[in-house]
Amino acid sequence: MSSSPNHDGSSAKRRKGNDGAVVGFLSSWMGYFTGRRDDNAELMLARNEQIMERMEERMSKMEEKLESLDDHENEERHEEGEECSEELSGGGEEEEYSSEGGSDSDEESMDSNYNTDDEHERKGRSLHAYQEMVFANRNDWTYSAKGLTGGDFDINSFAEYEVLDIINLVVSIKNCTIKMKRGEYHHEGEASLHMRGDDHSDLQGVLLGPCDYDYFDDFDREPVRYISALRPHWAQFAQALDDFGLILDVMPDDAESCFQISQIQLPVTVFMMIVKSLSGKLFRHYKFRNNDFGAYGIRALIDLMDSNPELRSLTLSSNRIDDDDVVEFLRSMANHPSLTKVNIDCCFEGRSSKYCMLNGLIRVNTLAEISMRNNDLSFVACGHTQSLSDSLASNTALERLDLRGNNLNDEDAASIATALQTNSTLKYLQLEGNDFTEIGGEYFGAALRTNNTLEHLFLENGVSDATFNALFDDSSLNSAADSNHICYIDRRFYDRNEEGDPTGNRQRKIYNVLATRNKTMSNVQHFDDIEINLLPEMLAAVQRYASTPVSERQLLYRVNSEVSGLSIVYELMRKWDSIYKTLGTIDRC
């Protein structure tokens, strides 16, 4: 078995050599799961009956709607026949109707009605086929794969926790298979955190993974190991998946349909069986994490992507992508009509094609989100720095880029920062866990002085210190006003910008400069270059900015709440004479 990325062999140290302990442990768990299934049988049957009653009610309503549409069409045909008879008998004196004189709006209305009728008929047929499938499975189908026994394990090769993982997986596969046969599907709310979408969207469909994992992006955790005794269970799973297209047809139109298998080892023979059952099922999201299905599996997945025009996102984290497959992978991405998100975290350890992959994905210029975490991507080491900068600078589609944990250094920071000065679409850039110093932070700071579209930049705290002057330069009112008010960098309780509030950010910074100077009554001496006729506007702005709220996280602006706007106005008015003398003589005409 090939190990997962970053695996250091520590799992072998955890394996137990006590044969009797493992056999006893296995027997107790098998008895536990058998008893639990018997206890839940009545509840499962009752739930199934409730689902069928709801589906029968929906089917009845759909049939009534179709009947009403048929009656309406018959009435229209009858009325048209009567009008035609009147025209043929010469009873009317209205203008003669010609085929060229029909109203465009009438034709569009008729087309719309026909389209609506066709959609109702399609949904009615889909619902009827779905209902027939559920009835047939309820009466004629049983889960036939046999449970595991102690003889299915080589007790010298498995630790106790690995045996437990496999037993849990059998239960998960069986439950998921039964659910599909009942015509049901998973919702995100039913899944633990590791099963949820990267963007926490409400995924619905087939979501399968170990039941005891807390995090879906646990790169250090090995997948559940495969044993030959699992094959009958996967065969039952694939058979149930064959009919899942009927379930997709009755899911809500806005459902984010997803097929996901996480942290489970899938040998290529099992994966090919699953891919065959997935063919023709138009899921919007594929998520495969740490499955170890190899190069043949990657190629089968590329073919599956090509055959699914509805696919919007693909996750392949911790699944190895070989150098020979990069070109075909990029071709599929470039030609796909709807794919906008790709996650290939931890897929290229030790392989040179990772640079070509990232550059290629950015140059595709149709992807809105790219994640390539933990791939050791230092471009300086291979001389690809300029190519990264050029690709990112010219991209007009990418909104999120995640390059965490890639050993990027300050020269890589300079390359990315240069691209940010030109790029106008990127909104989220995640760069934690790299090898930047304060020098790299200064590069990003310089980029933020010109970039006004990046909304979130994630850096290590030490690096971000050198970036903050770009977000708030308090050396003067003008520099504060000209700072970057859009980008948010998390700095614990010293955030410069509030997320999504550029206007409020600008007001807080200007008022902060005035409030800080008010502490020493030094505002007036900074007004040498301000025209006197602007003073009323400035006083009004002081009062307005004083009311801009400051969050608890923004300790940097705590002086804003300590100094009232009236105090600053009083300071300026009390120094009117000095202002008058400093700013020049007023025209008394």
Image: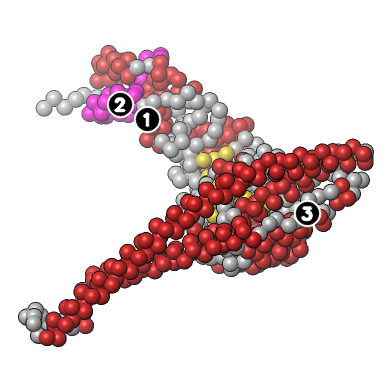
> What secondary structure is the magenta-colored segment mainly?
helix
Residue position for label 1: 507
Contact, mark 2 vs mark 1 (Cβ under 8 Å): yes
Q: Is residue 380 left or right of residue 554?
A: right
- What is the secondary structure assignment of the residue under circle 1? helix
Q: Nearer the viewer, residue 412 or 303?
A: 303
- What is the secondary structure assignment of the residue under circle 2? helix
Locate residue 86, reporting x and y percent: 13, 81
First to last magenta residue range: 518-547
Residue 79 visible in this rendered orientation of the protein: yes
Q: Tell me the residue at 8%/82% (across/down).
A: 91
Residue position for label 3: 146
Give amino acid for label 3: Lys
Q: Tell me the residue at 52%/53% (across/down).
A: 52
Contact, mark 3 vs mark 1 (Cβ under 8 Å): no
- Give the Cα distance between marks 3 and 1: 68 Å
